Amino acid sequence: MEKLLTNEFIMAPLKLGYCQDKDGKVNDRHLNFYQQRVKYLGAIISEPFYIQAGLRENPFQLGIDADNKIEGIAKIAELAHKSGTKFIAHINHPGRMANPNIPNNFYWSASAVPCENGGAVPTAMDENMMSITIDTFAQAAIRAQKANADFIELQFGFGYLLSQFLSPQTNLRTDEYGGSFENRMQFPLRVLKAIQQSVSIPIIARVSATDFQPNGITINETIMLSQRLEKEGVVAIHITAGSACSAPAWFYQHMFTQKGKTWELAAQIQNKVNIPVIFHGRIHSTDDIKLLKEKYKAQYLSIGRALVADERFVAKALGMANEPIRPCLACSEGCLGGVRAGKGLGCVVNPKVNNSFPEIQKATKPKNIAVVGGGIAGMEAAIQLKAKGHQVTIYEKDKLGGQFLLAYLPSKKESLIEIVDFYKKEIERLKITVEYKEATSELIEQQGFDEVVIATGAKPLVPNIKGLTKYHWAEILEKPYTIQNKKVIVIGGGLIGVEIASKLLDYNNQITIVEMLDEIARGLELIERNMTLAKFKQNNVQILIKHKVVEVNGTTVILENENHQRVQINDIDEIVVAVGMQSYKPFETSIPTHFVGDALKVAKAQEAIVEAYKIATQI
Ligand SMILES: Cc1cc2nc3c(=O)[nH]c(=O)nc-3n(C[C@H](O)[C@H](O)[C@H](O)COP(=O)(O)OP(=O)(O)OC[C@H]3O[C@@H](n4cnc5c(N)ncnc54)[C@H](O)[C@@H]3O)c2cc1C
Ligand SMILES: Cc1cc2nc3c(=O)[nH]c(=O)nc-3n(C[C@H](O)[C@H](O)[C@H](O)COP(=O)(O)O)c2cc1C
Ligand code: SF4
């Protein structure tokens, strides 16, 4: 392995969800995605291929289940090889994790333990099912070799089938495949052996160091497994943590998990084996790379979302491009969210992912452009317009960053600020003028601008509630410590209300959330949503859906339910109002005007950045 890769960077396997025809075949969307990222990498690992049509995790996933898939996969290998990059085909059997919403999927596992994440009840595999499965794996490996893969990566982790045999939580068998760890390893080792006998290319194992489950796989067991895999001829171990069913936040290295934990676990395994270990998980900056090399002596680094957020991540990290890295925020919103929504992998910070915008080209006729508002939409528009050769002035009446200066303040969302820092660096590097003043139509018209981009964001809505005079909005996130040990009512259970509630819980407040609709936490990214709702449950947050606040009378708040019955809540110390936002358009001008971000339509960061980029391509 060491001699075979030109450098230490390996692209991690990411389900792209780009087979819009549900045919499992490689198309231009896949090829474009890989083509933009392949340069400067030692190897790319493919999207995890399904090995049989009934074993799909996603309807839009790539397959390696039939010979008619080989030609397409070979195109990925070819584009990798043209850049001197190796191609690693990732094959996996999801077992109980096959998607229950896909017709004709089937669910086999070590035992009949369903996936707690909405999975079907699997059938415990008998010898015949094991033989069929082993053969299915071997056939997939043969196709990978025919498609010119240089390596196969076999999934032993993340709670998929082989891991379901390894974990005592999912393997309740009493035969020779259950019980001791030695027994639990037997079926995964049979799969490995069958693949080794079927192909001549080397095999990399992806393992979960631990799945963080009370009765799950421990780091000591994974060390034993890794040593055994080394003995059996595996050439490298790719260390992850978590499980798609039981610990998805770890699987996706979500911002809610501890950064660096997988590095520590990988280092423990590295100390006990003699084959290369591939470190992974939120390797998102040059500092991360330096730390991994110096502290953990990491030889190989697998990079997933950092390459989504910035296709030139490795070139920039290697110092080949003197530009800041567009940072992955570990939010999972655009990538995982896009795949789950059936749109395919996108990215909150990178508008080019999964959008067919033209590349930014130098404008034939440079213009003088005002960008009003220095939130993320305004800053994205400004840097792209400047890159096109236009003269750009940003007007910002407060601080660069806009609402994102609040968005990163809720619990465990610190990584969101990195995109604001990126834009500030770009504005400085590109020498974009920033005027810290409130723009008016007179000011803009006096300066002789050719066009104006209005990116002035949105303002919070205030409901017309009798007696409501003193309340907080998201600004409380800047000083949450000013409300401690209090009884707080949050009016509005959308994204902002829920995030404020979560933050105030950290200061020992007793929270009630009142929401008119039939659920709270709409609009939150799924992992964040699930973890936040679990936190609310643990902390006895009172959630009143289908209720609205109709009156405030001193410390008493009066609500009305859907049947117009009144409910009274007493002794309220503080009120938070988060019932939505409305676009803020401060002025009109005769100069040709474009609206972007929340000023155009109240939405989230991804929409703001995409719209800003799109407008920049058009000016
Ligand atoms: C608490 C909170 C949490 C959030 N969490 C998330 C999240 O997790 N994920 C997500 O995707 N989105 C989140 N959002 C939403 C996200 O912040 C917005 O979608 C995004 O910031 C909109 O960007 P924008 O540039 O359009 O507007 P804004 O960020 O509102 O920026 C507008 C800017 O214009 C300036 N301005 C206004 N008028 C003028 C003028 N006349 N002259 C000069 N300057 C002016 C303002 O000072 C401001 O800086 C959150 C928002 C909040 C409040
Ligand atoms: C949308 C998405 C889909 C993924 N699908 C898989 C998968 O099917 N199998 C797998 O082993 N890892 C999968 N991963 C995990 C990545 O390989 C990687 O471990 C994870 O993104 C954390 O690394 P990063 O911080 O470098 O992105 C997926 C990640 C994302 C974001
Ligand atoms: S959507 Fe978020 S987590 Fe996913 S790649 Fe983009 S910034 Fe990273």
Image (cartoon, rainbow, N blue to C red):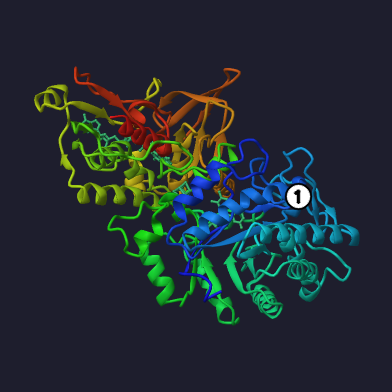
Q: Is residue 206 left or right of residue 604?
A: right
Q: Nearer the viewer, residue 383 or 213?
A: 383
Q: Is residue 436 left or right of residue 125?
A: left
Relative height, residue 8 to residue 132 (above, below)? below
Q: Nearer the viewer, residue 367 or 430?
A: 367
User: Which SS class for mark 1?
Assistant: loop
Q: Quadrant of the N terminus?
A: bottom right
Look at the image and tell me whether residue 473 can be seen.
Answer: no
Q: Position of residue 526 (x, y in %)?
A: 56, 43
Residue type at tag 1: Gln
Quarter location, residue 403: top left
Q: Position of residue 299 (x, y in %)?
A: 48, 74
Say which residue appears at 65% left-offset and 64% top-offset.
152
Q: Position of residue 88 (x, y in %)?
A: 59, 61
Residue at the spot of label 1: 52
Say which residue appears at 50% left-offset and 35% top-offset.
523
Relative height, residue 493 to residue 258 (above, below)? above
Relative height, residue 594 to residue 302 (above, below)? above
Q: Quadrant of the C terminus?
A: top left
Q: Position of residue 611 (x, y in %)?
A: 37, 32
Residue extending farthest to the left is: 446
Quarter location, residue 207: bottom right
Q: Nearer the viewer, residue 145 or 607?
A: 145
How many other residues sit within 10 Å of disc 1, few (<14), some (14-19) or many (≥20)? many
Look at the image and tell me whether residue 495 can be seen.
Answer: yes
Q: Nearer the viewer, residue 498 or 176?
A: 176
Quadrant containing ligand 2 reads bottom right
